[in-house]
Image (spheres, grey):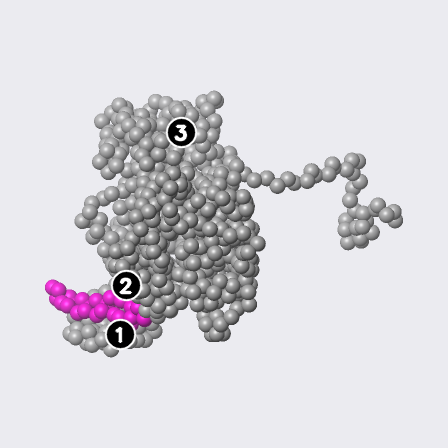
Amino acid sequence: MSACAPTHAADPTRPPRAPEPHSPPPAPPRRFRIAGADVSASIAVFLIALPLSLGIALATDAPLQAGLVAAAVGGLVAGRFGGSPLQVSGPAAGLTVVTAELIHRYGWRTTCAITVLAGIAQLGLGCLRVARSALAVSPAVVHGMLAGIGVTIAVAQLHIVLGGTPQSSVPANVLALPAQLAGLHPAAVSVSVLTLVLLLAWPRIPGRAGRALRQVPAALVAVGGATAAASLTGLRLPMVDLPSWSSHALAGLPEGPVLGLVAAVLTVTLVCSVQSLLGAVAVDKLVAGRPPGLHAHVGRSDLDRELLGQGAANVVSGALGGLPVAGVAVRTSANVHAGAVSRNSTMLHGVFVVAAALLMVPALELIPLASLAALVMAVGIQMVSLHHIRTVTRHREVLVYAVTTLGVVAFGVLEGVALGVAVAVAVALNRLARTRITHEEREGVHYVGVRGQLTFLAVPRLSRALHLVPRGSAVVVELDGSFMDHAAYESLQDWQNTHVAQGGKVEIAGRRLGTRIAEPTDGSHCRCRPWTPWRNHHCEPSAGPQPASAGGPSDDRERTGGTTGSSRRSGHQLARGISAFQRNTAPLVRGELARLAREGQRPSQLFLTCADSRLVTSMITSSGPGDLFVVRNVGNLVPPPGEESGDDSVAAAIEYAVDVLEVRSITVCGHSGCGAMQALLNSEPGGAQTPLKRWLRYGLPSLKRMATADRPWPRLAGRAPADAVEQLCLTNVVQQLDHLRAHDCVSRALAAGALELHGMYFHVGEARAYLLTGADDGEGVGTAQLFDHVDEPEDLPSPA
């Protein structure tokens, strides 16, 4: 065998390969390329990160260069190895209080060592794949922790804004505030006020010029404007002082009590990990909200890998004398909104930080410390989010939020989080154990209401309420809760059997273990799930002489018995469905419907679809009461204006939806196997003009459009339609959108940018929805006329 022969030539397991007359040319080496969107996004993030990193280092009383080191390491290391491609890491405001306390207690070199050990702990947690478990912490605890840190930051930086020096704790800062106000420094206050004014006013500049100016980050404008003003006016203020990198302090061996060091490492690990993981989940939401072209190639966050990347960044940052690193919401949001498409933007911003730290030292040393303090104080105030407060109040977790916030302010981050978790557990146990049981009589019927989780703890009170019901009476037991344990189930079942045996009547409504507690003497109660078609109900009708088969009433039995029997069974099915709604669904939606009754309907969508019984609009759109204003007719047709010939129902609905309800979107939805489209294809000219034929004339333009050779035919997810009926169904959706545009109210709303039109096609057999995509040619909707399917659930971003 020659030396140049392939090594696998003598392998007997490989099939013989046919000789190739010519070898393919070697593939050219792949060149590293950075998308233009990543370059522009990295510049925007760098301009935000530079002043914030210096400000956070100032707030922690660390060397100012430590903020630049952490920003560079966060961009390069966490950006390269992290699991969230678009999350930007660096020194975070949420770590300010923790780091400041560590520096005050142990010194800077030991704090760097603690950062290294916290990074090692994060690497261990990432290898154990426990990242998802960190998200089990109550959001009220996380938001309360951030709010407490924000209060601590704001109170401390207020002293620097006034020209003084902050104390070591929030109570000490508050006590020293009156003396600081009495001896404030006008120069520091004026620079700080200018910084805050620019920071708040810059994003609110109106008009077209404002949109262009807002491309420059407000933080950069605020600090740059204050620096320029201080330089031009010659104010004497403490400025940024960046010593030579040769004297930069690196990590040293940890010194201090072992238990204190362990607690410090756990605190840094907890805050860094939770903040980074929550930020990674939030990134997926932000990316999913961008236009399809911008998030098509951005993968979802791998939380375990993100934890590994953050751990590696903290090890490197601590070893190089940098602050602890975590995901930063402000920079991440700017990165996503600037259109970044890969992790290259995060890494490139780290390169820019390194260049600035080496080449821009003279310019950075012109920045007044008061301006950086004002910037960080504003960030701290923003961490106390009114949106978070409203959210926890709505979910009745304001006590957890308040205790965590006050605990962080008064005692520290780790202690405050521990208090918040303890209160969250206590609140959860209280909700599980607290059950309200009521009994009242109305018009001879006894109503026993159970509100809350029904566990063994509530069984004695439930038994007392049930034994107040007289023998032989009619009883309705209303269960309003999502959980019932076995003890409560047995107690309620035994009482029900006894009461029915004594001649009483019991009806049980609400949720319980996913099934109905059936009345033994009546088999009419259906155990089928919602959305089950009547013909597939596996339950025995109470009326009718025939016994039910094992599989439920068959189609053959439904079709026998004559008109009277069929009508009787149809009426029974309708009544049974209404009864099931009253028992199962009404208790769940009663509150929402009561709100809609008070406020009136405010739908955001007009949904125009076919009258076909297989199209359940609320099911295929996952919508609830009040979401859709639905118009249904045979063939989902929209008569052009002026051709209604006395039938103004569709035009009236469109006008009412657009002008009165002010809907923001109109969707025309066709479907597979449409009988109206089949009738159009099979129709012959002439003959008697029945009401159906007169109505279907509004579909004739769709037939004409399909027969026109110069128009592109609609396609379904890139494939040609299966047959002529499907082709006409797709074409009809496009044509009816053209009819919609001809209505005055629609054209006005479209011109004002207050309305959008959408085409939709539902394939009944595949249970798959398709949306119309493509460019607008100005005359019709969708030049490309491509109906593309909506992502399957596993392709959608997970909710946070």
Q: Position of residue 598 (x, y in %)?
A: 18, 49
Residue at the extreme left of the image, as rendered? 443
Query: Marks 1 and 3: CB-CB under 8 Å?
Result: no
* Nearer mark to the viewer, of 2 and 1: 2
Name the kind of residue labelled 3 in the image: Val
Of residue 763 and residue 592, the one placed in the foreground of this image is 592
In the image, residue 645 lies in the stretch drawn in magenta: no
Q: Residues within 10 Å of mark 3 (few under 14, many from 20)?
A: many
Q: SS of the residue at dot 3?
A: loop
Q: Secondary structure at mark 1?
A: helix
Disc 1 designates what residue?
Answer: 458
Q: Residue at x 49, y 62 (%)?
A: 108
Please give the residue where the numbered disc 2 appears in the rendered image: 175
Q: CA distance from mark 1 to mark 3?
A: 61 Å
**Which tag is nearer the camera, tag 3 or tag 2?**
2
**Disc on the earlier residue, 1 or 3:** 1
Q: Which residue is mark 3?
A: 781
Q: Quadrant of residue 380?
A: bottom left
Report the number of discs: 3
Residue 435 is a magenta residue: yes
Residue 554, percent from left and from top: 38, 55
- Side (left or right) of 461 relative to 259: left
Q: What are the residue bounds of the magenta stretch? A: 425-453
At 22% across and 27% down in the image, what residue appears?
646
Q: Amino acid at mark 2?
A: Leu
Answer above or below: position of 469 versus 624: below
> Please, what secondary structure does the residue beneath circle 2 have?
helix
Q: 367 and 429: which one is in front?
A: 367
